[in-house]
Image: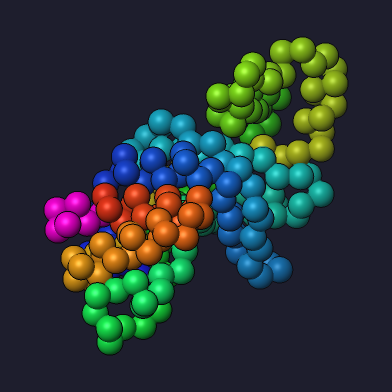
Amino acid sequence: MYRPKMFDIDDVTDMHGIIQANGFAVLVTAGGQGMTASHIPLHLMDDGEFGLLWGHVAKANDQWQAFDGKTEALAVFGGPHTYISPRWYATKKSVPTWNYEAVHAYGRPTVMDDPDQVLSRLASLTAQYEEGNPPPWTMDGLPDDFLRAQLKGIVAFEMRIERLEGKRKMSQNRKPEDAQGAIDGLKATGGKVENQVAEIVAKANKDRL
């Protein structure tokens, strides 16, 4: 990923935070049929230097055949992003741009064959997204034979992260008054995502504003 120094994220904890907040990823692999991408939720585990990702795809999805533990794959996690209008800047000679943050995780996926381990991982993935629900849904009430029948329709895999790349492009390249203008303009839209980006712009430029 192209990462100018002012936008580069080199802190693993920071990148893990983006992954955990935006777990619905794009998983990209390359094989005999060329490039393949799937949109799937991935669960981050604190295991190893950069962590370990766990997920699953439908067994009918041929992408799992590339999970041989040898071929490198890429998981792309995109955070809040939005259009930035030049009309918000104090500097009038400006052009539109896009503010965003993203993390790329690279590794070599391997298929998981142990059904008990897969069920445990599925419970963890569910708990991650049920957090805050009153009360959270769990798999505890489902019959064991039903759950194991469901496993036949998926292929679970894990991918130890071998390298991480992070980028946060949030107006750090603009003058302080332009960054503040972007914050004010985003908040004025009233949009949820725009407000999220405004908060990130403020944090990314806190030493200048």
Q: Is residue 67 magenta?
A: no
Asked whether, in this view, residue 128 is left or right of residue 37, the answer is left
Between residue 181 and residue 68, name the one nearer to us: 181
Between residue 204 and residue 2, name the one nearer to us: 204
> Residue, x 36% and y 46% (percent of image)?
15
Q: On the image, which quarter does residue 205 sit in?
A: bottom left
Magenta part of the chain: 204-209
Magenta stretch: helix, strand or loop mostly: loop
> Residue, x 70% and y 45% (percent of image)?
57
From what the image shows, is residue 72 above or below residue 173? above
List x then y, in percent, for residue 130.
61, 26
Asked whether, in this view, residue 56 is left or right of residue 209, the answer is right
Between residue 110 and residue 12, name the one nearer to us: 12
Q: On the image, which quarter does residue 111 sit in?
A: top right
List x then y, in percent, for residue 62.
75, 54
Asked whether, in this view, residue 141 is left or right of residue 178, the answer is right
